[in-house]
Amino acid sequence: MAIELIDPELCSGCAACVDSCPMDVIRMDPDQAVAVIRYGEDCMMCELCIVDCPEDAITVTPFAVSPAVRSWG
Amino acid sequence: MKETTVQTDVLVIGGGMAGCFAAVKAREAGRDVVLVDKGYVSKSGETPYAGDTAVFNPAWGHDLDAWLTQVRTVGEYLNDARWTEIVFRDSYERFLDLRAFGVEFLEEDGEPVRLDHPLTQIELPDRDKFPPLVSQVVHWLPGWPAKLRKAVVKSGAKIIDRFVVTELLMEDGRVVGAAGFDVEGNATRVLRAGAVVMSAGGGGFKAVGYPTHELTADGHVMAYRAGCEVTGKEFLSPHHTNPEEPGWPPIYPVFASGHSAAFPGAWHDPEMVNAEGDPVPVRGMAWHGWIDAEWEAHEGRAPVLAAGPPDGKVRPLSGPGGHGSMLGHAAGGIVPVDDTCATHVPGLYAAGDSCGTCFVGAAYSGFGFATMHAAVTGARAGLGAAEYARSADRAAPDARGEAEALERALAPLRRRGGFTPRWTTQVLQNALAPYFVLYIKKEERLRAALTTVEFLRDHVVPKLYARDDHELRLAHETANMVANAEMKLRASLLRTESRGTHYREDFPRRDDPDWLAWVRLKDEGGVMTPFTEPIPEESRPDPALPYAQRYPMRLPGEEAR
């Protein structure tokens, strides 16, 4: 996974990363009031979320790509 | 799902550099403005990746003829010289605007530091044989996208983030607004407007498995469907992507921390080495940014290794079927019909990478040219749209047409099965991204890819389905990418020569008598129809110039420098 972690211990729930993400990878968890990785397979590793996170809570690695989709439906 | 209707004078679709300028200028002209973006205004598309912007200013010693010659030579005469000059001449005023927005630039003694074109900083024994690169950039300091957004907010334009526009609304042959939905939750909106600015970026293709951000061609396709002409689709902006570590280099954090490729000493010539250990010949404008790696792959000499910036580490730059490309940066897009960026469809204006001014021609010679072009066309489109919205009669709302548009927007969500956007996108990427389709082109391979694309268009796209709100956006993006693929293939088939970043194995030379012309595409009765338009007589190269001087970029098979 390209985006690997949004540390729930560090996340302050400001949602800056939700706005930063061009791919809608990150959403807010309505129950926990923290940001969570919802669509990690669409991460493009641009690291905009890392730049904007005031708590340094996000880890992105440069190695992974989106998995191949083998099923058409 | 809740449905709302928004009414405004000027609707701007896409909030990068171009859209922000359009919004601010339309507000300055006294019009109400709504600016929507499927991401977040100021951070969407390619805007955050820009490290510099080019600025032409005679007071800094810049020579207009020399700058125009750079673009003409690298763009191989297919730049629209009128637009090239407009962009250069407007750029200083847009630079002053950016300063007024609060964007900070690297300065010395109150003057911005001008940085030379990075490729002129590479030592070459035969520099005089490469195209002349005289353009300069200025470097903005970290945090500038936030200043851009602040300027939009201060102007009084209303921002709607994370909203996907799916189609333009038409009335009597005019564009009168747009329809779409929220990324999260999919609540629908009708956006009624006196005029619309399309500034939603460009579109290219990357290999299967790569995300499609900034490659979906939403703006080009929506405008094409509304009746606009589109141009420049056969050309490429070959930004290579590392196949093993696609997130490297991390471009945005590098630029956001104040890096510039134009800093003296910052740019390394990648010095590609092929699998046989031989250096790869430089064919482009002094670096390996063109089709060099693809040609090595084609000749069976992959992997190509390159020690690239920013750390000088050796990595495989590309491999057969695994290379990436960005978009036709500022090369192609919606054809403007006048200096205000009006299009063939009344009420619609185009700006930035969505706008096909052809100001760079068949290959991109600039550093910082795309942001300069986005600022200039954004401002002009904003003012043009504002004037149109002020003076034109408003159409009465067509409630039925609006409801049908919203139905189409939500249709993939209503289907219970069909084809997923992710699978379809990967099939498309597999058909388009291998080097032998859009880089080393040949008629039968283009036709084979087109057969696949036509099947996707006719059979798969109508059955795309979305399992949740996130996939609804993907479904519409996938449909747009299929349309963009058809445009790129049809334009590539028509141009039966090689020029700039368009290389045809079956027509491997430039053909000045027949092809000093642009390829345009338009919808004729539901059929995507390519046609040509000759460049103006005064833009043609001097036929008395020796070929190697007329075309300093070398095509495969042409003698090395």
Image (tube, coloured by chain):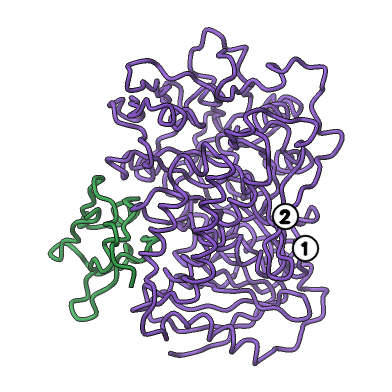
Q: Which mark is residue B335?
A: 2
Residue B410, placed above or below residue B154: below
Residue that carries the numbered disc 1 in the rendered image: B344
Residue B513, placed above or below residue B228: above
Circle count? 2
Q: Quadrant of residue A55?
A: bottom left
Q: Residue at x 71, y 60 (%)?
A: B522
Q: Position of residue B151 (x, y in %)?
A: 55, 59
Which chain is the one coloured green? Answer: A
**What kind of residue is marked 2?**
Val
Asked whether B296 or B201 is in front, the reply is: B296
- Discs 1 and 2 carry the same chain letter: yes
Q: Position of residue B413 (x, y in %)?
A: 41, 82
Asked whether the residues under the numbered discs 1 and 2 touch, taking CB atoms below 8 Å apart as contact, a structural biologist would say: yes
Q: Quadrant of the N terminus of chain B?
A: bottom left
Asked whether A32 or B543 is in front, the reply is: B543
